[in-house]
Image (tube, grey):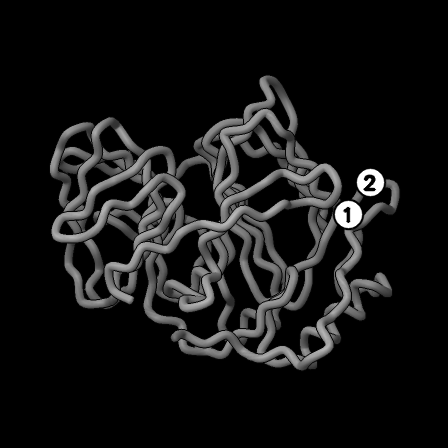
Amino acid sequence: MDGRVIEPREVPLGGLRALNVWRTLPHRDLPTVGAWCFVDHFGPTDDVMTVLPHPHTGLQTVTWPLSGEVRHRDSLGSDVVLRPGELNLMTAGDGVAHSEFSVGEPHVMHGIQLWVALPDGPRSGPAAFEHIADLPRVAGDGWRGIVLVGEFDDSRSKATAHTPLVGVELTLAARSLVTIPLDPTFEHAILAVDGSIGVGGGPQVAQRSMLYLAPGRASVVLDAERDTTILLLGGEPFMEPLVMWWNFIGRDHDEIVAARDDWQNQTRRFGHVDGHGGQIIPAPPLPQVRLRPRVRR
């Protein structure tokens, strides 16, 4: 897999008034990069985000807007407007529900939503929510960045991480060969956010595509024709089995069935999100076969 480029697939998000997103993780051959297990890139678009209350288990949601504002409400009582340069991180634990709606002017939405798989222990623990506005800024020769999660270039984000993990927005200077430091114990992925990038000794990565880098690298050399934003993700390979279905992550089929039943029956497990008049996104039907853990090929 090292050096492989993963092409995105377009997916409608949020029902009838869907916001289309470009999804690179999970991929059929690569379910995770570290504990990162889900990457959606949306926009730039005039379409608005209208995602009614829906549930999560066993994961963290990480929301990073590049333009536009999103109102986040959840069953913990959080009600926050997220703006560019700020990070929302919600830990689902055993169960949480939330909604996301575009607010403000102009309605130009552009951003990235990610999931982090939780390890045993935190995945069955309490839910939590963090809104972080003072993220560390870093810079090097030909690049500058914002540390979203974990540690990079001796700077650490306040965002809670339950496994060794890194997530950084980087801007590459135009027409420069840029060397980006990497933790050689991590595997990494690079998402080309707003333009294509070249990789020293490797392929060209088109906008919205993702490059996978196996553990063992201490750096990667990149170049771009113009100032270009990328997202660097990484972490120690996540070895626990993951059954991912809809908005749930568990370890086996029965956990997913129980979570779906609890959501459909609106039990206390997921709580209530105020401000939507009882409207929710119902769970889709389960497949007619037992769900199995995702594996790398």
Q: Position of residue 66 (x, y in %)?
A: 45, 32
User: In terms of depth relative to the viewer, which is nearer, 133 or 237?
Assistant: 237
Q: Are marks 1 and 2 in contact (CB under 8 Å)?
A: yes
Q: Position of residue 155 (x, y in %)?
A: 27, 47
Work out whether 136 lies above or below 280.
above
Identity, as a three-letter code, of the amino acid under mark 2: His
Measure how far apart labels 1 and 2 are at the Cα level: 7 Å
Identity, as a three-letter code, of the amino acid under mark 1: Val
Q: Nearer the viewer, mark 1 or mark 2?
A: 2
Work out whether 165 lies above or below 192.
below
Left or right? Give the position of 76 relative to 83.
Answer: right
**Residue 36, located in which quarter of the rendered image?**
bottom left
Q: Residue at x 59, y 25 (%)?
A: 46
* Residue 290 visible: yes
User: In terms of depth relative to the viewer, which is nearer, 189 or 73?
Assistant: 189
Q: Which mark is residue 8?
A: none
* Residue 136 visible: no
Left or right? Give the position of 151 relative to 288.
Answer: left
**Residue 214, located in which quarter of the rendered image?**
bottom left
Q: Secondary structure at mark 1?
A: loop
Q: Look at the image and tell me in which quarter the N terminus lies.
A: bottom left
Work out whether 186 lies above or below 16.
below
Q: Position of residue 145 (x, y in %)?
A: 29, 37
Q: Look at the image and tell me in which quarter the C terminus lies.
A: bottom left
Q: Residue at x 12, y 38 (%)?
A: 177
Left or right? Give the position of 266 relative to 230.
Answer: right
Q: Which mark is residue 273?
A: 1
User: In terms of depth relative to the viewer, which is nearer, 95 or 50?
Assistant: 50
**Residue 250, located in which quarter of the rendered image?**
bottom right
Identify the residue position indicated by label 2 in the image.
276
Q: Residues within 10 Å of mark 2 (few under 14, many from 20)?
A: few
Q: Secondary structure at mark 2?
A: loop
